[in-house]
């Protein structure tokens, strides 16, 4: 066999091992949690937080927020982190924030000394 064939077989075996490991060790969601939540408060749903990092997304943030607002899951909080945008991203999110109390804008800060981009 060629080196490429051995490499391909090795890669596929590694992928198979990862899949099997994930199936065996994956922490499955507890179905009883939502049952307990609804027993405590009838009709209650667990809170889901949607975190949106945004930098200069004024042209597309509105359609994303519209889609999230229309979602049928009601116990939802939508947190938009404005990463020092230089366009109208923050202004557009503020408009949606006034319309829907589940939306919250989190303004970004300048990076601390010695930090680089997304690592912060």
Image: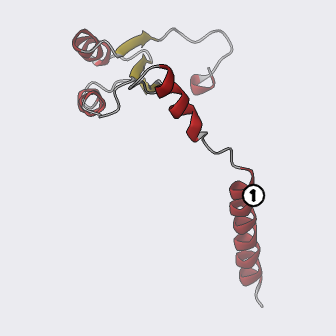
Residue 37: x percent and y percent? 51, 26
Q: Is residue 98 left or right of residue 34?
A: left
Asked if 92 appears above or below 32 in the picture, the reply is above
Residue 83: x percent and y percent? 45, 18
Front residue of 99/62: it is 99
Front residue of 30/80: it is 30
The quarter of the picture where the N terminus appears is: bottom right
Query: What residue sits right under mark 1 in the picture?
Result: 21
Q: How many marks?
A: 1
Q: Quadrant of residue 17?
A: bottom right
Query: For numbered disc 1, what is the local secondary structure?
Result: helix
Residue at x 72%, y 83% (from the top left corner): 5
Residue at x 64%, y 45% (from the top left corner): 28
Q: Residues within 10 Å of mark 1 (few under 14, many from 20)?
A: few
Residue at x 58%, y 12% (from the top left corner): 111
Q: Quadrant of residue 107?
A: top left
Residue at x 74%, y 56% (from the top left corner): 24
Residue 48: x percent and y percent? 46, 27
Front residue of 2/35: it is 35
Residue 106: x percent and y percent? 43, 11
Q: Is residue 120 left or right of residue 61?
A: right
Asked if 15 appears above or below 26 in the picture, the reply is below
The quarter of the picture where the C terminus appears is: top right
Q: Quadrant of residue 45?
A: top left
């Amino acid at each position: 066999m060629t080196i490429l064939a051995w490499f391909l077989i090795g890669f596929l075996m590694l992928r198979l091992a990862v899949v099997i490991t994930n199936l065996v060790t994956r922490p499955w969601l507890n179905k009883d949690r939502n049952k307990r939540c609804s027993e405590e408060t009838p009709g209650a749903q667990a809170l889901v937080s949607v975190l949106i990092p945004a930098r200069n997304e004024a042209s597309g943030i509105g359609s994303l927020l519209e889609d999230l607002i229309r979602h049928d899951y009601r116990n939802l909080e939508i947190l938009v982190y404005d990463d020092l945008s230089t366009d109208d991203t923050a202004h557009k999110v503020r408009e949606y924030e006034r319309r829907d109390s589940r939306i919250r804008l989190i303004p970004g800060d300048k990076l601390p000394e010695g930090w680089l981009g997304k690592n912060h």
